[in-house]
């Protein structure tokens, strides 16, 4: 179970060996801000997002749909660690923008399946490739053991951050 910061309890302070690692975190932040993300986004996707007032929260849905298999709104909510109404709202905005398509599940007509609109697949694939390129280049320089350690650390960090929501 992830540890969350309890009110009134002092946060864990990095050890001297950890200070250098913790100091790297703010250096990554600009890469996740709007301006950099906007520059990496292919024009058709950027224009659809901006024209329809979609936010990074909407954008977080899109990589989940790249595998090509439609997902239910419930699956999207679970993957993004958001409530079902929030996931439904995000999918609704993306659907109105034409970026995703919604269809009845033929196996269960009460369920709605969400898939990426085919016109947006190439721009999204390009965007994801651009966003992950620095990480993949960094991984290329690591040994298999270093890669495994990096993956374990990054996975643990994601779990902790998601547990704080």
Image: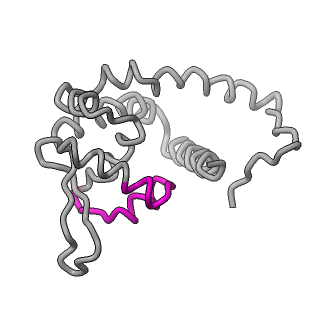
Q: Residue at x 11, y 42 (%)?
A: 119
The colour scheme applied to this rendered structure is one colour
Q: Residue furthest bottom?
A: 107
For this rendering, which residue is in front, 58 or 159? 58
For this rendering, which residue is in front, 142 or 85? 85
Q: Is residue 16 left or right of residue 78?
A: right
Relative image position of residue 150 (x, y in whole percent) = 55, 42
Q: Residue at x 26, y 67 (%)?
A: 112
Relative image position of residue 61 (x, y in whole percent) = 35, 48
Relative image position of residue 143 (x, y in whole percent) = 49, 40
Which image quadrant: the N terminus?
bottom right
Q: Residue at x 28, y 28 (%)?
A: 50
Magenta residue span: 68-88
Indicate whether residue 87 is drawn in magenta: yes
In this rendering, the answer to whether 131 lies above or below 82 is: above
For this rendering, which residue is in front, 63 or 132? 63
Relative image position of residue 98 (x, y in whole percent) = 17, 44
Indicate whether residue 106 is drawn in magenta: no
């Amino acid at each position: 179970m992830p540890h969350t910061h309890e009110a009134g309890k002092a946060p864990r302070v990095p050890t001297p060996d950890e200070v250098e690692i913790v100091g790297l975190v703010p250096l990554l932040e600009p890469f996740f801000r709007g301006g950099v993300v906007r520059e990496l986004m292919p024009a058709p996707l950027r224009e659809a997002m901006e024209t329809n007032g979609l936010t990074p929260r909407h954008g977080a849905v899109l990589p989940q749909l790249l595998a090509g298999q439609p997902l239910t709104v419930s699956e999207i909510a679970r993957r993004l660690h958001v409530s079902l109404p929030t996931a439904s709202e995000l999918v609704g905005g993306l659907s109105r923008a034409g970026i995703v398509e919604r269809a009845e599940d033929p196996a269960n007509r009460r369920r709605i399946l969400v898939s990426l609109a085919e016109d947006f697949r190439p721009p999204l694939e390009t965007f994801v490739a651009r966003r992950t390129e620095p990480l993949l280049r960094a991984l290329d320089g690591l040994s298999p053991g270093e890669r495994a350690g990096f993956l374990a650390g990054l996975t643990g960090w994601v779990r902790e951050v998601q547990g704080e929501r």
